[in-house]
Amino acid sequence: MKGKAALESTQMVEVEVMRKFSVENVIKETPDTYTLMLKPLDKKEYSFVPGQFNMLYAFGVGEVPISMSGDPDEKYLIAHTVRAVGAVTNALVNTKKPGFIGLRGPFGNGWPLEKAKGKDVIIVAGGIGLAPLRPAIYYILKHRKEYGKFFFLYGARTPNDLLYKKELKEWKSRFDMDAFITVDAGDEKWTGNVGVVTTLFKRIKLDPDNTYAFVCGPEIMMKFTVLELRNQGLTDDKIYISMERNMKCGMGLCGHCQFGPYFVCKDGPIFSMDQINRFFGRREV
Amino acid sequence: MSQQKSCFALDAERFGDLIGVLKDLGYVVYGPVERDGAIVCDLIDSVEQIPKGLSDVQMPGSYRLVKRDDGRYFGYVVGPQSPKYVLRPSQHLLFKVRKDGKTMLPQPDVKKIAFVGLRSCDLKAIEILDKILLQGPYVDNTYAALRKGALFIAVNCTEPGNNCFCTSMNTGPFAQSGYDICITELLNDGNHVFILDVITDKGAEVVNRLGCRNATDEELSAVSRLMEEAKNKIKKKLNVENIKDDLYKNLEHPHWNEISNRCLACGNCTLVCPTCFCTSVFDKTSLSLDMAERWEVWDSCFSIDYSYIHGGSIRQSIMSRYRQWLMHKLATWVDQFGTFGCVGCGRCITWCPVGIDIVEEANKVRG
């Protein structure tokens, strides 16, 4: 097929396909996870809603979807927490000036922070799943009076795998939130809870008609967290989870992120359980 | 036919004039061409390239061209290539990036395209692609550029194939919409005429230049008769009533596993499908490392990489990949875009190397 006839092109025109950011600071969170603080090279502000993600591009290597993990009010220094496990993520965390990171976004919806106003909120995070939830935590703490009780449960595999350790300490010491942290396996220095994140549910009592839950973590962790939330009487319309699927375009055009009838990139990544309970937890959907 | 007023007749001998007019009007013409034992969609310079006197015999997993001696132009149905091959190129450059971050977009010198010989099912497929790629929230610029200004000359199927089930999907065998000119080929007693149904100004421009006489009442009633006959020739049926809910209910049906014993996950069905739109991208750099490119290529939900996330692919088993594809075509597509992702063209049945039949499998899964 000589498919080029209708699409012959040699001329290139300079168009901004992505915004460019420099890496201002790299914070090592765990042995393989880093938070990159990105500054817009065009000096224009960048806004997002907690729970959204960007497509980050490493020059010549590729592009990956990464959630924003910082304060949504910070418009000139955008935090992304990246686990460096592949070619692109390794290239991203090793980007040094004058190198740049290309950014397309923000994509996707956000946590239902408006809807939850006047209600109690429980945030449950597993591992790096805390990253897209941290902007929501910042938001709630900043608008603390607009929410009722605020619970935060966080689990990681080991103490070493806990993200944002300083902040965890601060959150635990606050009187206006109930924060519980656990690890699957402790080490010699760990004096906290041991067990998966769902074991923390026995510590709390939720008001089922008056509570919104935001959950992010590995799918298996979310599956059992949803069961615990239901046990406490929460209905599916109040349980929100952030899904992960392969995302290439971010715009619902490439098809990769399909999850049942949804494109995770444009219809999600955050879904209420009543939207997806037909598909969630089903193998290989 | 509803638009009787704008029906014209063109002697089949003058088919070449039609191609000529299209070229005069500045169109790049794509039409049916015989190559490698199949009718494919390719560039047409003159009418001689368009095969005459050929039929295709399509069965599950089988496609054969056979000669016929009546000199009919459109005595076959759909070949492996749909208009997707032209409108959504299988591989193309998205952009270039310089080391300093400057990005450059190709400015395609897109010519107006005229498609000759599209079938009703393919017109419907373009309508579906329009919905996905043009009607937001995001637009595919390449598709938009190629699609804009395109002229569609359809051909009504008077001899549907064995794998066709357009009547079930309500997409054929006669074109209902989405064309500029629609041809019905009449051939009897040595009388070889194209009846042209023109419904757009773009189509009228072509026909005016061409100069045709009006179709006679006799010819128009022959067209109607052929349409009825064609409908009745289609034996393959898929009952689409409640199919979405039936499939949703049967996500764990044992028949999915049975299919995966036969399915090779080769992805042929997704390549030949006129509505399968999935793509992937790859990045490459120049040897000097100062310029990078991003290319878009077709992808298939049958590849294991398609659903890859950190930790492994979501759909490891062939069972789950076939299920994803079929469920998308006949169930989730409806929720996504308000239409089926299947137009009943039968290509996936014909070009499946092991002859898996979407109609049969869907019916079995429904129990």
Image (spheres, coloured by chain):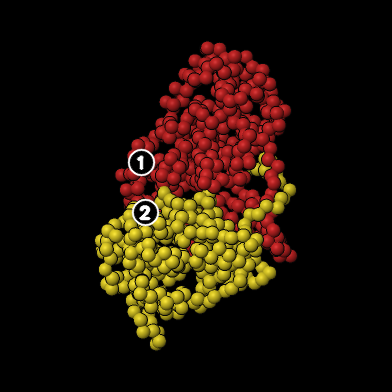
Chain colours: A yellow, B red
- Chain letter for the residue marked with disc 2 in the picture: A
- Say which residue appears at 48% left-offset and 59% top-offset: A49
Query: Residue extending furthest bottom?
Result: A188
> Number of marks in the image?
2
| Same chain assignment for discs 2 and 1 | no
- Say which residue appears at 28% left-offset and 71% top-offset: A204
Query: Residue extending furthest top?
Result: B217
Residue B91 in picture, x, y percent from top left: 62, 50
Residue B314 in picture, x, y percent from top left: 44, 60
In the image, residue B56 sits, relative to residue A12, either above or below, namely: above
Give the quadrant of the N terminus of chain A.
top right
Label 2, secondary structure: give it. Answer: helix
Q: Residue under circle 2?
A: A276
**Marks 2 and 1 close (CB-CB < 8 Å):** no
Label 1, secondary structure: give it. Answer: helix
In the image, residue A12 sits, relative to residue B195, either above or below, namely: below
Mark 2 or mark 1: which is in front? 2
- Say which residue appears at 72% left-offset and 28% top-offset: B24
- Say which residue appears at 35% left-offset and 37% top-offset: B241
- Estimate how packed mark 1 is, as few (under 14), some (14 to 19) or many (20 or more) residues with alpha carbons within 10 Å: some
Q: Residue under circle 1?
A: B243
Amino acid type, mark 2: Ile
Residue B66 visible in the current orientation: no
State the separation of the CA atoms marked 2 and 1. 19 Å
Amino acid type, mark 1: Ile
Compare residues B286 and B30 and report the one nearer the observer: B286
Residue B210 in picture, x, y percent from top left: 67, 20
- Estimate how packed mark 2 is, as few (under 14), some (14 to 19) or many (20 or more) residues with alpha carbons within 10 Å: some
In the image, residue A123 sits, relative to residue A173, either above or below, namely: above
- Chain letter for the residue marked with disc 1 in the picture: B
Give the quadrant of the C terminus of chain A.
bottom left
